[in-house]
Amino acid sequence: MVRCDVAGELLGSEPRHYYTLDSLRGIAALTVVANHMLIMSDQGNRIWWHGAQPTGIAGVLLFRTPLAVLFQGVNAVYLFFVLSGFVLSLPWVRGRSQTYATFVIRRFFRIYPPYIAAIILSFGLLALAGHPPVGETSYWYSQIWSGPFDGRCLLAIGMMDTRNAFMDFPVWTVSWELGIGLVFPLLMMPVARYGARGLAVSAALAILIGFVLRVTGPVAAEVGRSACAYILLFLMGAGLAIIADRAQGFFALHRSFGSALGIIGVLLLARTWSDRPLIAFLPLGLGSMFLICAAISEGPLNRFLMLPVARWAGKISFSLYLIHVPIITAFVAFGRLPLFASIFLGAVVSFAVAPQFHRLIERPGQQAGRFLTTRKSKMPVTIEQMARNRT
């Protein structure tokens, strides 16, 4: 049977929780780690980003076939956004009430404390290892810990300004997760009131936000294009959440169809479509939706994602995502081992540290968010009430 149990991460009323999607997020995080391990070296970076021809049959199979999905770190981020939209929209799709303050506080404590802890870890490793030039490393490696380290930089880091992501490159996506989280309940207001029809209103609002930013200035225009694409990815996940129950019922009767969607999803996610989010979001968003359908429906992918190792990867995925670049960079900077050995050892240590980071930083942050919102659970205005008040 498909595992869809009850968990209370988002609401006191305990919405339905899809454990296979935790595992899918874990597999996506592993893809990001694999990509960063590859592009840390100059040869890997040239193969991945500059079209250099890989050597040997193994290289061709890994980088010039659908197996390249194993290294598609950027595409995995698009999958993260669709997954977030799916999971975060479930309370509204299921008709459960939630205050805006509750949602924002829990989202903040879910993301910000681990983010700050990862940045502090990165500064600490920089102080220990330094950042000397290392032979055979890539330009991407040289940009990590590149500074400048001044008061303005520290303020920008504290405000999650993605232009200062050089301390820990993956945090740019975390900034978008939190930023979109601030407006996500508002985007769900039409969904709470009108269901699937309301989703079209939310999509139009996302496009409007992008257009307004575009005419403001060149910097705002770039932010607007990205914001529009990423919000639409969240809404694609929300749209899938609306039909999730019906989709599961359909796939229960047509299991091969769910597996076929999973294969199509992998093929879409295996390709580099564009470096422009407004172009890439549609094929990658569709691929992510297809893969999620396969993950929540009975079939080979669902069974794989319920394995203990996949569940473990899902549990530590956020922590691993945040800490692996600083740790691998520190091992490379020490320069005591051949480059490949340093990268591999850094990845191994990242996997060892991630569960402790989850236990000491990530989980207490979630508990703090729940504690604060439980004490304030009598706050009167729910998202559904906000939606009704606007009509």
Image (spheres, helix red, strand yellow):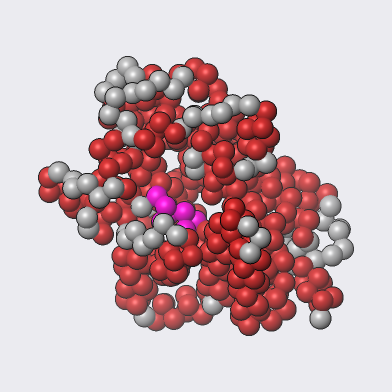
Query: Image check: 49 left or right of 75?
Result: left
Q: Residue at x 70, y 56 (%)?
A: 182
Camera-nearest residue between 119 and 376: 119
Position of the C terminus, as image quadrant, is: bottom right
**Residue bounds of the magenta highlight:** 73-80
Residue at x 43% of width, y 64% of height: 280
Count of marks, rendered view: 0
Instruction: Examine the residues drawn in magenta and state their main secondary structure.
Output: helix
Q: Is residue 114 above or below residue 223?
A: above
Q: If the image is split into quadrants, where does the N terminus sit?
A: bottom left
Residue 220, relative to residue 244: is it above or below?
above
Residue 338: % across, % down: 26, 23
Looking at the picture, how far across and down is residue 380, in whole percent? 87, 63
Q: Is residue 330 left or right of residue 107?
A: left
Q: Is residue 84 visible?
A: no
Residue 290 visible, this angle? yes
Left or right position of 223 against 192: left
Coordinates of residue 226 in the picture (x, y in percent)? 54, 59
Image position of 98 (left or right of 160)? right
In the image, residue 78 lies in the stretch drawn in magenta: yes
Using the rendered view, name the quadrant where residue 230 is placed.
bottom right
